[in-house]
Image (cartoon, rainbow, N blue to C red):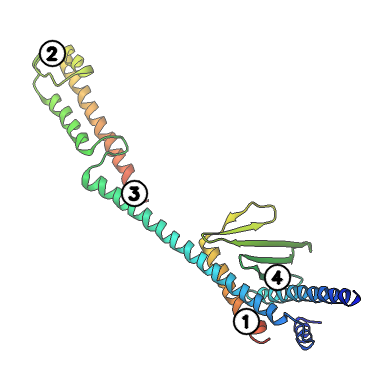
Amino acid sequence: MNLFEQLAESIEAGEAGIKHLLVQRDTETTAAVTGLEGTVDHIEQVAVMTAKTALNAQAISLEMVENTGQHDDLGMHPERREAEIDDLNRSFNAPFAPGGDSRISGSESLVRQETVAPAQSDELAAKKLSVAESLRTVYAIHEQTESSNEQR
Amino acid sequence: MIKKLFGNLSAQKQEQRRAELYRNLIRHEAKIGGELFDPVPKGGRREFFCLDRHTWIWHEEWLDKTGQRQVKSTRYDVRPNSILKAQAGQPYQAVTLDEARNLRLAARLYKQRIDAEIYHTA
C-alpha cells in the first residue's frame, strides 16, 4: 500500500488525528525551510561584513603608509630614513675638523679619529660612501618588495 | 475491564498507524527530494529530506567502478548562526557560503514539490 492509499484509507476510516498529522508535518517542513533561509541570510551578511572590514583595513593601512608616513616593516619612519641618508651624505661631504662635529658618534667618530693621516682619508671616505650606498640599496630593495607585495 | 483493555489496544494500534504513516510521509518526501537534481545513475539511490525543523539529510548510494556499493550520508544541522555538516568518519564542520546557498535552493525546491504533491493535494 502506497502513501496515498494509506492516507485515503485512514481518512475514510475516520481515524482521529490523520489530518492533524499532515498539518503537523507541513508546519514542520515550512519551519525548517524558514529557519534555513534565516541562517543562510545571516551567513551571507557575515560574509559581506567580513569582506568589507578586510577591504577597509587594507585601505586604511595603505592610506597611513602613503599619506601619514607610518613606520615601515623595518620599523623606520620614511622621513627619518631619508634624513638618515642625508646625514650620512652630509657628514661624508663635510670638511673634516678635529673635534668639530659633535653629532658624529660611536663607530663613526672612531672612524673620524682614525682619519688623521691623509693617506687613509680617501679610503675611509670610500668606505663611508659604500655604507651610504648600501643603505640606499637596502631601502630600495625593501620598497620594491613592499610594492610587489601590495600588487599581489 | 475488557472494554477498557480493547480501548487501550485500539488506541495503541492507532498510534502505531500514525507513526507508520508519519514515517511513510518522510520516505515519500525523501524520494521526491532525491529527484530534485541530476538523474540518479543506474543502480544508485538518492534521498534528500527534512528530518525535523533543524535537520536536513542527504543520502546517496551508487556503484563504483568495481561494482561495489558505496554509501554517503550527510546530515546538516541548521543553527541560528551557522550550518554544521556531519558525514561518517568525519568531524562536524561548518558549511561554506556556497554550500549553504545550495542547501537553501534544494530546500526551497523540496518544499515546493512536497506541497504540490502531498500536502496541498491531500
Q: Report the amino acid beneath label 2.
A: Pro
Q: Residues within 10 Å of mark 2 (few under 14, many from 20)?
A: few
Front tag of 1 and 4: 1
Residue B106 visible, this orientation: no
- Residue B58 sits above or below residue B39 on the image: above
Residue carrying label 4? B46
Tell me if B22 is positioned left or right of A112 in this view.
right
- Dot 3 surroundings within 10 Å: few (below 14), some, or many (20 or more)? few
Quadrant into which the C terminus of chain B falls: bottom right
The residue that label 2 is drawn on is A118
Q: Which residue is mark 1?
A: B115
Q: Chain of mark 4?
A: B
Could you confirm whether marks 4 and 2 are on the same chain? no
Chain letter behind tag 2: A
Determine whether the residue tagged by mark 2 lies in a helix, strand or loop: helix
Chain letter of the residue carrying label 3 = A
Say which residue appears at 73% left-offset and 66% top-offset: B61
User: Is there one chain holding both mark 3 and mark 2?
Assistant: yes
Residue name at image x 77 percent, y 71 percent: B43
Q: CA distance from mark 3 to mark 2?
A: 48 Å
Q: Position of residue B17 (x, y in %)?
A: 80, 76
3 vs 2, front mark: 3
Using the image, determine if residue B7 lies above or below residue A101: below
From mark 3 to mark 1, how far is it between C-alphas?
53 Å
User: Rounded to the nearest whole Å, what is the CA distance between mark 3 and mark 4?
Assistant: 48 Å
Q: Could you say where residue A107 lies in the image, as x and y percent from the top left? A: 23, 17
Q: Which residue is mark 3?
A: A150
Is there CB contact under 8 Å for labels 4 and 2? no
